[in-house]
Every structure is written in C-alpha cells, then in structure tokens.
Image (spheres, helix red, strand yellow):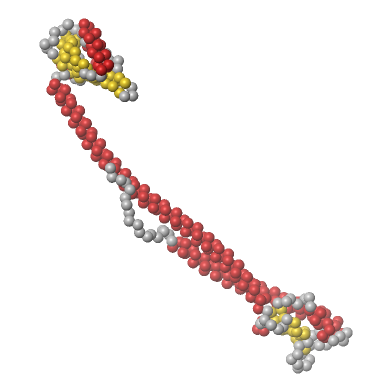
C-alpha cells in the first residue's frame, strides 16, 4: 500500500511574520532615541536650574555676610575664602571682581581654572556695604552634561533591553508559528495520503463485496442445480440455516425449521445412525456419509436421502457446529 509520507526536497525558508519583530525593533529604537533625547534635555534643564539656584545662593550668602565684614574694615582676602569654603560646590567655579578700580586681578578665585565653560557663566553685581563687586560663577561641563549623559544612558539601556526582549519574544512566536505551519502541512499531507488509502480500501471493499456476492450467487446456483438440501447446525444439532430445497424435498418452509433440532426430520428408526454419524464427524473431523430416510410433511411419507455431515471446528472454541447436505436418493427405501 502506498506510504502517506511524501519526500519533499529541502529548501531554505523564512519564518512567517519576520516583519513583525523587525518593526518592533525599529519602533523600539526610534522610541528609545526620542525618549533619550527628551530625558537628556530635561535633565540638562534641571541641572541648569539647579546651577542658577546655587549661583543665587552664593549671591545671597555674600550679601548676607559681606556687610558685617566690610564694616569691620577687614581685608577682603582674609574672610572671603572662608565664606565660600563649605558653600561652594566642587563643580562650580567662583570669581569675585571689584568694580571700583580697573584691574584684571580678581579679589577671589576658586575652581575657576581648568575645565570651565565660560559661555555658561552667570554674573551678578553685588553691593555689600560701600563696595561694588561682580560675582561670577562658571559651571564645569560635568555639572550640566553628566546629568544629561546619565539620563540618556538610562533611557537607552532600558529601551534597548525592552526592545530586545520584545523582539526575542516575537522571534520565538514566529518560530512556533513556523513549526505549527510545518505540522499543518505534514498533517495535510498525511490526510491526503489517508484519503487516498481510504479510497483504495473503498474500491477494494467494493470489489470484494462484488466478488462475495458473485460467489454467494454461484454457490446458490450450484446448490439449486445440484438439488441437494444444505443445512448448518450448531454444536447441539439445532438448525441455524437450511436452504430453500427443503420445500421441494420435504414440503417444509425453511423459516419454520430455524432453531429446531435437525433430528426431528430424521425417521425414528434412523436417528441412532444419525447420532453416530455426527459423533464420527466430530471425532475425526471428516465428512461422514449415511443413507437414511427423512420425514415428509405428510408424516406417512419418508424421503430417502444421501446425507453427508462435516463437523466445523474453531481453534479457540473447538466444535462450533455441523454442515450437512441431503441429496434425494430414490433407490434408498424408507426404513
């Protein structure tokens, strides 16, 4: 019988729906870039606002402490450094210049050298007492850019992780979809093979049924042509089937004899011989022949027949019945 598995040449294939993880990855990168830009700008603005607040705090500190110091006629260089020693953050440079004379030398300069961005400097005129000063603060690039950099790194790390996770999960789903599609194709192929097998079996069944019908018809024709009466008995000798020839031979209806002992059709004087024939057939499992008379419907008439008996045997149950034929024999006299 033809196998349902068909050989398909291997060829590289792409998983279905691969555009979905690609779209998710690109969308995640774009969204992450936009979020990183927004958050870095926000962090930079917050750092700028904090720097302005720190500058104003230094100005307020100078305005609060300088009048008392200047009224005591203390030298400026003695108390200015100690005033900002703890209040000045390390990321801010401070410079104080006097406006009373034209000089480039500042009164005080702290953290004002090195990596300082002058473009971001804030200047405020202060008048503590009778003096006029210019307080200048300059933030280091780390003050403004570090917060923006950290925000950008955090957003990119989170966005890339989420995008990679979503892409990976989508790839797993695409792979499962691909495996399921292969299984569906294989099931369709097997179903096609099974349908073909079923069709073949249906054809074979039709042929066998036709052959069986022909054989049964042939057997009936042969039985009818032979003129013999065919009968099947169970292991107790009861009739399970009897051919229509009983109507011609004994003038009895076949349906009336179903489940009746065949022995009642035998003339009383020959019933013992009939039992002996059944026992011999059961013992040897061979065809036993016996000549005896059968009772006609009209009990006064006996019909001599040639009776052949064969015991039926099953390997599991042993004796399962008998099959016999009765052929009229006019030369045999009734007992």
**Residue at image x 79%, y 78%?**
85
Q: Is residue 145 left or right of residue 7?
A: right
Q: Please report the residue visible at 54 percent of the width from the left and 70 percent of the height from the top.
A: 33
- Residue 240's x, y, as percent? 26, 19
Q: 67 above or below 149?
A: below
The residue sitting at 51% across, 60% down in the picture is 166
- 137 and 263: which one is in front? 263
Quadrant of the rendering where the C terminus is positioned: top left
Outermost residue toward the left in this view: 331
**Residue 286 visible in the current orientation:** yes
Apparent side of residue 187 relative to residue 37 in the rendered image (left or right): left
Does residue 221 lie above or below 199 as drawn? above
Point out residue 128 in the picture as x, y percentages from the top left corner.
81, 84
**Quarter where residue 51 is shown:** bottom right
> In the figure, residue 293 lies in which quadrant?
top left
Q: Does residue 45 show up?
A: no
Q: Is residue 290 left or right of residue 24?
A: left
Q: Residue 307: horizontal and vertical position, in percent? A: 19, 15
Residue 14 in picture, x, y percent from top left: 40, 60
Quadrant of the rendering where the N terminus is positioned: top left
């Amino acid at each position: 019988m033809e196998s349902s598995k068909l050989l398909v040449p291997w060829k590289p294939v792409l998983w279905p729906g691969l555009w979905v993880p690609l779209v998710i990855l690109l969308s995640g990168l774009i969204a992450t870039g936009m979020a990183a830009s927004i958050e870095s700008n926000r962090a930079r603005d917050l750092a700028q606002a904090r720097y302005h607040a720190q500058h104003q705090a230094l100005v307020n500190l100078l305005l609060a402490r300088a009048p008392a110091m200047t009224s005591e006629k203390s030298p400026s260089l003695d108390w200015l450094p100690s005033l900002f020693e703890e209040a000045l953050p390390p990321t801010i440079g401070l410079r104080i210049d006097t406006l009373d004379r034209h000089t480039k030398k500042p009164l005080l300069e702290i953290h004002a050298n090195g990596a300082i961005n002058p473009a971001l400097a804030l200047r405020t005129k202060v008048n503590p007492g009778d003096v006029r000063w210019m307080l200048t603060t300059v933030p280091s690039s780390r003050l403004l850019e570090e917060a923006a950099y950290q925000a950008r790194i955090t957003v990119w790390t989170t966005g890339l992780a989420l995008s990679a996770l979503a892409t990976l999960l989508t790839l797993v789903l695409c792979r499962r979809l691909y495996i399921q599609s292969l299984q569906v194709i294989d099931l369709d192929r097997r179903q096609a093979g099974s349908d073909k097998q079923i069709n073949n079996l249906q054809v074979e069944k039709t042929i066998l049924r036709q052959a069986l019908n022909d054989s049964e018809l042939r057997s009936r024709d042969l039985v009818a042509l032979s003129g013999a009466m065919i009968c099947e008995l169970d292991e107790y000798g009861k009739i399970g089937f009897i051919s229509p020839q009983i109507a011609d031979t004994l003038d009895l209806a076949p349906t009336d004899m179903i489940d009746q002992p065949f022995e009642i059709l035998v003339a009383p004087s020959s019933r013992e011989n009939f039992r002996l024939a059944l026992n011999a057939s059961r013992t040897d499992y061979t065809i036993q022949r016996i000549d005896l008379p059968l009772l006609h419907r009209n009990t006064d008439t006996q019909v001599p027949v040639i009776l052949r008996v064969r015991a039926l045997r099953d390997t599991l149950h042993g004796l399962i019945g008998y099959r016999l034929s009765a052929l009229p024999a006019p030369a045999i006299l009734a007992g």
